[in-house]
Image (tube, rainbow, N blue to C red):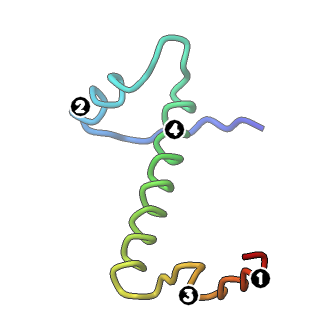
Amino acid sequence: MSASKRIPVSEEHWEELGDLKGAGQSWDDVIGDLVKHYKRARLFREVHEARESDEFRSLDEVIPPEDTKDE
């Protein structure tokens, strides 16, 4: 279900949004893309912060390698 909403933006941001909008793309598409990219960037930032703070462990540290008896 579609709902119309008004979002006030500055002239500068309106022009920047216009630069992002492709031919045949709706404003809803532009905003959806911005949200998707923001969420992805936030995830990458959180992973980077976890790695830097030693909250991140490699799988090798968590799951010991299996013994290789075929040698």
From this view, report whether residue 44 is shown above or below residue 31: below
Q: Quadrant of residue 7?
A: top left
User: Mark 1, mark 2: which one is toward the viewer?
Assistant: 1
User: Mark 3, mark 1: which one is toward the viewer?
Assistant: 1
Q: Give the residue at mark 4.
A: 33
User: Mark 2, mark 4: which one is toward the viewer?
Assistant: 4
Q: Give the residue at mark 2.
A: 11
Cα distance in 3D space between marks 3 and 4: 37 Å
Q: Secondary structure at mark 1?
A: loop
With 71 as the anchor, is 52 left or right in this view? Answer: left
Disc 2 or 4, which lies upstream in sequence?
A: 2
From this view, report whether residue 5 is shown above or below residue 65: above
With 62 as the anchor, is 56 left or right in this view? Answer: left
Q: Give the residue at mark 1.
A: 69
Q: Give the residue at mark 3.
A: 61
From this view, report whether residue 23 is shown above or below residue 1: above
Q: Secondary structure at mark 4?
A: helix
